[in-house]
Amino acid sequence: MRTFFALIRRDVTLGIRASGGAALSAAFFALIVVLAPLGLGPDMATLKSASPGLFWIAALLATLLGLERIVQPDVEDGTLDLLRLSPLPLEFVALAKIISHWLTSGLIITILAPALAPLLNLSLDAVPVLALSLLIGTPALSAIGAAAAALGASVQRGGMVLALLALPLNIPFLIFGSTAVAQAQTNTDPTQALTLLGACSLIAVVVGSIAAATSLRLNDD
Amino acid sequence: MPVLAYANPERFARLARSLTPWLLGSAVGLLLAGLFLGLFLAPPDYQQGDAARIMYVHVPAAWMAMFVYGCMALASAVAFIWKHPLADVAAKASAPIGCIFTALALITGMLWGKPMWGAWWVWDARLTSVLILFFMYLGYIVLWNAIEDPARAVRAARILALVGAINIPIIKFSVDWWNTLHQGASVFRADGPSITGSMLIPLLVMAVAYNVLYAALLLIRMRAEIAERRLRSIRLGLEFEPK
Amino acid sequence: MQLIGETLAALRGERIVFRNVSFEVAAGEALILHGPNGSGKTTLLRVIAGLLGILTGRLRLLDDDGKPLTDDRRDQAFHFISHQDAIRPQLRVHETLRFHAGILGAPLKNLDAALDAWGLAALATQSAGFLSAGQRRRLSLARLSLQKRKLWLLDEPTIALDAQSRAQLSIMCIEHLSHGGLIVAATHEPFLGDPKSLHLGPRE
């Protein structure tokens, strides 16, 4: 268990200090939200109806950013060897990586999103649902991302392959998350969407940990 | 001879070589028959007229898109559990074939969509799902090509195919859910246009033709892959051991 | 403790790097691996560490009673210091070692002593990115002092070290051997007076 927390502590520290880390995710997220009105036009009604989807697309892309930094360097500098020799099962190594990635991307986005809500004219009633949906959904994005990153760590030309592998698997979260926010904005009950989001998120974290661990074992040879 | 005896790559390649011409021949025959039945003999749709005939190419292709992914996932599962090299070869060989069926389904879907919906693309639940499936095929193929070390590529591809297979039902469900929410009154009914017997027969003939074609192409690609692996092991100085 | 390898062969990628390698290391003994580049010294160390499978042969790590160690106890029986140092420039020296202590499950109270023993105490709060090659090497070697483990697997331990640090490393190794420890080291240089050596690859 000590290994687990030592790994989270170290990965979060790296995530905060590394150049492609938490600050970049947050900045990227904010940038998409700021740029969207410039592309869509300043019409408040258009922005209002587009905002749930825009927030979720921004979250999806922003969490994609830090992925190549969470597994690849560990494979290259021998940290993965040391982790494999530690008593901690690789499934938990993967879980620690998912948690640290979420702490330095999803969590920050969740905190940032309500502050940016007025920029896209998201109605005030929907703001708590936006925060809640991101809180429930972004761990899944980290989990799927970590699995893709672990798989991609055996690929030299990582970056774009990662995105291609991870994005289709993220579609359910985009759908359930943005729909929940849109429903809250139009005074429809978002409970069903949020429940589905939560259920898929749980599955993704479990499957993601296992798939990431299995991918890490690829470096056996 | 028991079926398992063909699990040996050498013997499999020999069997495949003798089967391929037969399969390829019957695939071409069935395709011609299916197209003739569908394009000339079947009655035109009472609403859509002759435009609906594209269905005989489109619908079986969409079936194949899913079926081939299923085969790929199954082969990957077999490879994952029993570590059998032929299963990996089958999965790898299936991917481009499935990808082409998916592309065919997408393109014919768009061609069909123009006269039917008045637009080349509509975010219909099924078209969307097939589009996502197409990207998953692409991801799988890209992963194979991106990894230099074949031993590692094999194992990475297995994981991706399996994770994809777990996710497909979830993605399908979410897309259907999203679609019913946003396009409740779509032109296209969820159960599709009703089909009469005279339309069903060419459809089934085409489906069988596609399946036989898949089998033939699969065998050809698998033989090529086995030959390539043999070549690699010869080049590495490791004797290919027939067990 | 005792480490025995019998007629080992191993693959690296799709190439056989060595075959028919046998050796025996008993408590208090050091085995030095020699051989040209690519002869499989690192591969053999990774095989002993259990990071790589073997193609043929048998590898056993026996405890003091002559019984083979179970998998989980096996991983706790050795330190593996590879040429990959698992050091990130974004972490400070003491943070790096603290993380390594966490992975090893070593008590944190040994942290300062380990930094001291390898002459890193003055650099503790410096960013690891600013270390010289020799200092980085010492930081990875400091893992040896975090926790007592019977077998040390060292890959090119002397590389980039200055004379003083080499002497320090030798003293550490000799002390470790005198307490019944085992060492398997791969190196191109004379090390510990070459007590027992194994040559890999073709002889020039």
Image (cartoon, helix red, strand yellow):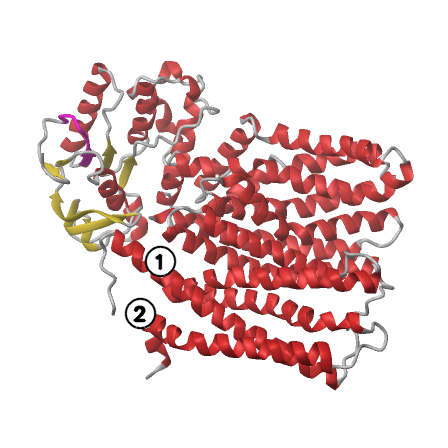
* Residue C53 visible in rendering: yes
Left or right of residue C88, residue C5 in this image: left
Which residue has dot 2 on it? Answer: B10
Q: Is residue A73 above or below residue A209?
A: above
Q: Dot 1 falls on which chain?
A: B
Q: Nearer the viewer, residue A161 or A121?
A: A161
Q: Dot 2 falls on which chain?
A: B
Which element is circle 1 on?
A: helix
Q: Nearer the viewer, residue A174 or A200?
A: A174
Which amino acid type corresponds to the residue marked 1 in the rendered image? Glu
Label 1 Cα crowd, 10 Å radius (few <14 / some 14-19 / many 20+): few
Residue at coordinates 61% horizontally, 67% vertically from top-left?
B66
Q: Which residues are magenta?
A: C183-191
**What percent of the width, then of the height, locates residue B68?**
55, 67
N-terminal label among 2 and 1: 2
Q: Is residue C85 magenta?
A: no
The label shown at residue C86 is: none
Which amino acid type corresponds to the residue marked 2 in the rendered image? Glu
Which residue has dot 1 on it? Answer: B228
Q: Nearer the viewer, residue B143 or B26?
A: B26
